[in-house]
Image: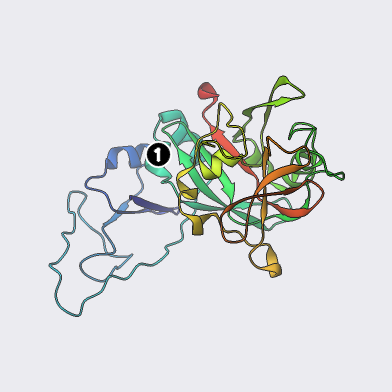
Amino acid sequence: MADIKIKQTAEETSFEATGVEAVDLEVVKTLFGDRPLIQCVNMDMGEPFDPYAECDEEDVMEPEESTAGTATIRRVIQRTITPDILSRAMEMGELDKVLPIRSEIDVPLVDGGFVTVACGHVTPTMARFVFKDCWDQGVMNDENTNKTGYYKSKARKHVLEDILPNIAPEWRELMVPRKLCEVIDGEKVEYADPMWLPSATDVFGPSNGRWWNDEPDSFQMEIFKRERDRIKELGDEGTYPWWLRSVVAADAGSFCRVFTDGSADATGAYYSCGFAPGFDIAAHDSE
């Protein structure tokens, strides 16, 4: 899996790529300008990584042959990214080259803090994110009913009115409403939200006879294909079950959720679970 990290300062741009066979440096220069470029490729193999070592633009480090007693070490390298960089990448149709799946971004909040989101799906012009951990916890509805669907639930109102406004304005401007669809009291309801709770299909894949109904816009995101990757925490509470927006089709009082071990589960709407919403960003002409 490719891992691309970029750091930009007033003097230079540092570019690192692992798990790729080739890099189009002209795309990088178009996105980030003509500042001096430091290129480091395949940092997890070969000689120890030196972030200050300048490389020729066509020089790609070849991995050394494995010898007895050697081991591979991986490190998380932090870099900065801005809404402007993401916007330019989307407009150029190069977002998937800048933002690999599983990338994590610490999105700024209006109070000066941040919330970490993980990239679960990306194309050249759009990306889908989900909060890495739970923002807070609460009920889906005050009463034990799912007849409201997600559309008229207390949880939806909480996401849109209590969580979304905390995101810094320049990052909220990147968001595009996701089209949602569900059946409530036998009628098809279509609407669009800039921030939403994931569906059961987003997390677990097609229902295949299980207890939720699939939605037209839902598919399993790559970051949820392993059970352990579905586990989330809630502050000092540690691992915590978290809500999904899908109702339990054969039950009038329950919604789907992810249990603390990452498995599919369901519970009554008036029980308290974590909220880990998601959002899409996209180029304006791809909305």
> How dense is the environment of label 1, judged by Cα within 10 Å: few (below 14), some, or many (20 and up)?
some
Identified by mark 1, the residue type is Asp
Q: How many marks?
A: 1
The residue closer to the viewer here, 86 or 238, is 238
Q: Return the x and y of residue 107 as percentages of the image width and height.
A: 60, 51
Q: Where is residue 97 in the image (x, y as percent from the top left)?
A: 37, 41
Tell me the residue at 49%/44% (across/down).
120
Q: Name the foreground residue: 96 vs 189.
A: 189
In the figure, is residue 44 to the left or right of 149?
A: left
Q: In which quarter of the image is the C terminus?
A: top right
User: Which residue of the protein is positioned furthest toward the right in this rendering?
Assistant: 143
Q: Which residue is drawn at 59% across and 41% down?
A: 200
94, above or below 107, in the image: above
Color style of the picture: rainbow
Q: Is residue 108 left or right of residue 269?
A: left
Nearer-the-camera pick, 47 or 243:
243
Could you say whether the residue bearing mark 1 is in a helix, strand or loop? helix
Q: In this view, does 135 lie above or below 202?
A: below
Left/right of residue 84 with respect to residue 100 in the rendered view: right
User: Residue 64 appears at what percent x and percent y?
Assistant: 14, 66
| Residue sticking out furthest to the bottom | 69
Q: In which quarter of the image is residue 177?
A: top right
Residue beneath the point at 28% across and 64% down: 44
Which residue is under mark 1? 96
Q: In which quarter of the image is residue 137?
A: bottom right
Tell me which corner region of the image, top left, top right, bottom left or bottom right, holds residue 156.
top right
- At a point 65% along the width and 39% down the height, the residue shown is 172
Residue 110: horizontal and vertical position, in percent?
72, 50
